Image: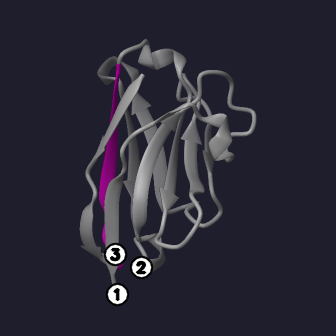
């Protein structure tokens, strides 16, 4: 499956952005999906994940209550709505999909397919 992120950009602290991840190549609806981010000099970290049906969602503590992950299977797209953005949210954001299950959804090694990333910059 091929993944392409979009929607990144520059925003002031307190603002909002919505990231999109468009999937192609295989049946999107059978894949769980996740969002990760990587800031300069830091390791890639888990942000959010969603089950194939959208019925289960998971968030990192640092974004809980501010970010919302969702998906529209008919559009082969997963979204990350980011509100109340902070400068520490600045990073390249990646969407990812695991070929198998998602028991360890916060572990990047669970995921087999990755997009190229989209830059999010939050100014103070």
Q: Residues within 10 Å of mark 3 (few under 14, many from 20)?
A: many
Residue at horizontal 49%, vertical 38%? 96
| Helix, strand or loop at mark 1 | loop
Residue 107 covered by magenta stretch:
no
Residue beneath label 3, please? Answer: 122
Question: In this view, which residue lies farthest toward the front?
Answer: 41
Residue at horizontal 57%, vertical 41%? 49
Q: Where residue 8 sits: x, y (%)?
A: 28, 57
Residues at circles 1 and 3 in contact by the CB criterion of under 8 Å: yes
N-terminal of the pair, mark 3 or mark 2, is 2
Q: In which quadrant of the rendered view does residue 89 lie?
A: bottom left
Main secondary structure along the magenta-highlighted residues: strand
Spatial CA distance of label 2 from label 1 is 6 Å
N-terminal of the pair, mark 2 or mark 1, is 2
Residues at circles 2 and 1 in contact by the CB criterion of under 8 Å: yes
Residue at horizontal 49%, vertical 61%? 38
Tell me which segment is drawn in magenta.
13-24
């Amino acid at each position: 499956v091929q993944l392409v992120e979009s929607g990144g950009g520059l925003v002031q602290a307190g603002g909002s952005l919505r990231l999109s991840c468009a999937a192609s190549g295989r049946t999107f609806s059978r894949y769980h999906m996740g969002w990760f981010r990587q800031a300069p000099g830091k390791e890639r970290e888990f942000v959010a994940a969603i089950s194939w049906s959208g019925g289960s969602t998971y968030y990192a503590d640092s974004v809980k209550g501010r970010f919302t992950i969702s998906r529209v299977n008919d559009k082969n797209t997963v979204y990350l709505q980011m509100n109340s953005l902070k400068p520490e949210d600045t990073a390249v954001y990646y969407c990812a999909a695991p070929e198998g299950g998602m028991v360890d959804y916060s572990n990047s090694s669970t995921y087999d397919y990755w997009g190229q990333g989209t830059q999010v910059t939050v100014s103070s």
